[in-house]
Amino acid sequence: MIPAMVVLVYLSLIVYIGIFAFRKGRSTGEDFFLASRSLGSSVFLLALFGTNMTAFAILGSSGLAYQRGIGVYGLMASASGLVIPLSLFFIGTRLWALGKKFGHMTQVQFFRDRWECSFIGTVIFALTAAMLVPYIIIGVMGGGHTLEALTTVMGPDGKPVLVEVVRNGQTLLATQHWVSFEAGGAAVALVVMSYVFFGGMRGTAWVNALQTAMFLCFGTIAFILISKNLGGFEQIIARLSADPKTATLLTRHKIPVEEFFSYTFIPLSAVMFPHMAIMCMTAKKVSAFKKTVIFYPICIMLIWLPCVYLGVLAADQFPGLQAGESDDVLLRLLTANTDAWLAGALGAAIMACVMATDSQILALGTMFTEDIFAHYGGKKRFGEKAQVWTGRAFVVLITAVAYFIGLRLQDKAGIFELAIRFAFSGFAALAPVMVAALFWKRSTKWGALAVTLWVAATMMGTWYLYESTLGIAPKPGQPLVPIFPELGNLFLRSPGNVLIYGYLPVMPMCLGSAVLMVIVSLLSRPPGRTTLEKYFPGAGVLSLAKSS
Amino acid sequence: MRNLCLLLLIAAVYVLHQDFWNWHQIEPLIFGFLPVGLAYHVGYSIVAALIMAVLVKFAWPAHLEKYERHESNGTKSEEETQP
């Protein structure tokens, strides 16, 4: 019960932060959606990092490391540690400046103005919004599952109490929880909705900053305590390496070279994630990016190293977990190796990460009110106050919808997790649109439309291939299966993916996007001179050159 | 010339991510508990931070700092409009 109480205190605290932010705010759109572009460098760093750190980064990385070994760190963390700060350095700073200069709040506003288009902007909005929704559903579901796992009823022997339950006419043994999935999900949805509703971007940024600080702090303490409780890491590593079944977890034996390389494309998604792009516009000064880009790789290391390392060590303490079961190895390690108070504190921090869905909800609200409501005349007709309240209403609506979908499709979380995996590739493949808009004068709206359609088509194609080949998917450790034998190794099926010549689809998707952007832009008419002069006036906002 | 050097530096670090020589190695265990393949990538994260520090020092887009004086919505602040 103690972890649940600690989590409850934490949830109350962040609702208070939301209300405090509300009292500090003004009733303008820019204040609600962007905190009046006023974040200082420390809050900006922690909030930006917290925004990008989801349940997947924490629970997913440990679960994946349990299955595939230490290579998960190189696969996801170290590549992100280079590519994301580079994106923030080259792209984030320009987005910030454009927001300051022209008042843009979303990527689509910028694209519409930069390429003199309206409908194509709506198409980009539709695709990015569609790719963002699964994150919100998974966030709410993750909240329910985490709260349920943290409140498992334990017996005097320290093991979960099992009770008989009847499901679909069958009697099964199941664990008992103080807080059910439904109640946990509702609590998380309500809390997130409250502080986003009241606090807007200011509340969200403060909560994200607190979340990152908490996880860094309690994560380090838990890492040290788990190490002590297990008798030191050296002994576990010696045991794991002595057993041929687990020794491969200490190498990259289970990760093919092509997959490892393909993963370096995934972090390109960061610049196209609406919540990241919008967060870039909240800094008070461009110099806030200096600290952020330097410390970002270090923050990634401090969060991911314990998660991946402990995920691998869990193979020693909890051997034989299947893919779905291993997702909560971090929570299992915590419960088994730390006292209830620390487990509760770190549980609250994990809850906070799961609730990173806040910035996605706010981003979707911002996009809807700016790219649809305001763009199609709502702001002019009803005024700025109505725009803010539309944003707030949208926050309530999207959270409620996400909760009810999560509740209804509780056992089908895999569908949304899959959607997120495809969405990562989709956002990464949209990166050439942003790069072209910022740095290539000759780029056109038709190039952007071609890329958007290409990304939508390839995502649907990959999804179709994935679903239609479930029956022939090899088991882990078995060789890849050609999907169309007559095409050789062009399309391969791995246990969890469709591969193109052994590479993840994200790679051809990104390369295809870049090629399409160039070819279609060169074949179509560029924007007018006035627009080009607005965005490329000599050593202006989009200049790569340094000229102070 | 400086920009070219920085570009080559970034490209080199990007390529160094593919440490195929550590693929099947467990040892040496760094600090006695980190398999070499993991320790390499932890080091890589630190190098990434250093690279970013180098970029901030030598390639910072200082021309963007003038927009710090802009009030939101593209209007200039009082401070900027003063002579």
Image (tube, coloured by chain):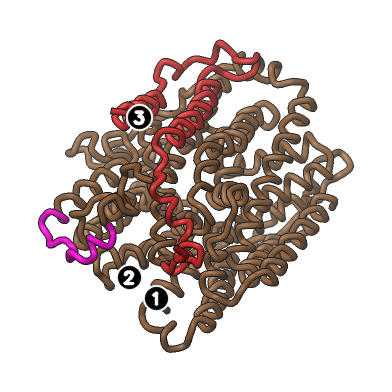
Chain colours: A brown, B red
Name the residue nearer the viewer: A119 or A143. A119
**Residues at marks 1 and 2 on the same chain:** yes
Whether A522 is among the magenta residues is yes
Horizontal side of residue A358 vs A503, given as left or right: right
Q: Which dot, 3 or 1, sits closer to the camera?
A: 3
Question: Quadrant of the rendered structure where residue A260 is?
Answer: top left
Please rate how many residues cluster around mark 2, counting C-alpha atoms within 10 Å: few if below 14, some from 14 to 19, many from 20: some
Q: Amino acid at mark 3?
A: Leu
Residue A75 visible to the viewer:
no
Q: Residue at x 51, y 32 (%)?
A: B49
Whether A518 is among the magenta residues is no
Residue A534 visible to the viewer:
yes
Mark 2 — residue?
A122
Q: CA distance from mark 1 to mark 2?
A: 8 Å
Mark 3 — residue?
B6
Q: Amino acid at mark 2?
A: Thr
Pointers 1 and 2 in contact (C-beta within 8 Å): yes
Q: CA distance from mark 3 to mark 1?
A: 41 Å
Residue at the outermost front position: B83
Q: Residue at x 29, y 54 (%)?
A: A433
Mark 1 — residue?
A372
Name the residue nearer the viewer: A184 or A221. A221
**Residues at marks 2 and 3 on the same chain:** no
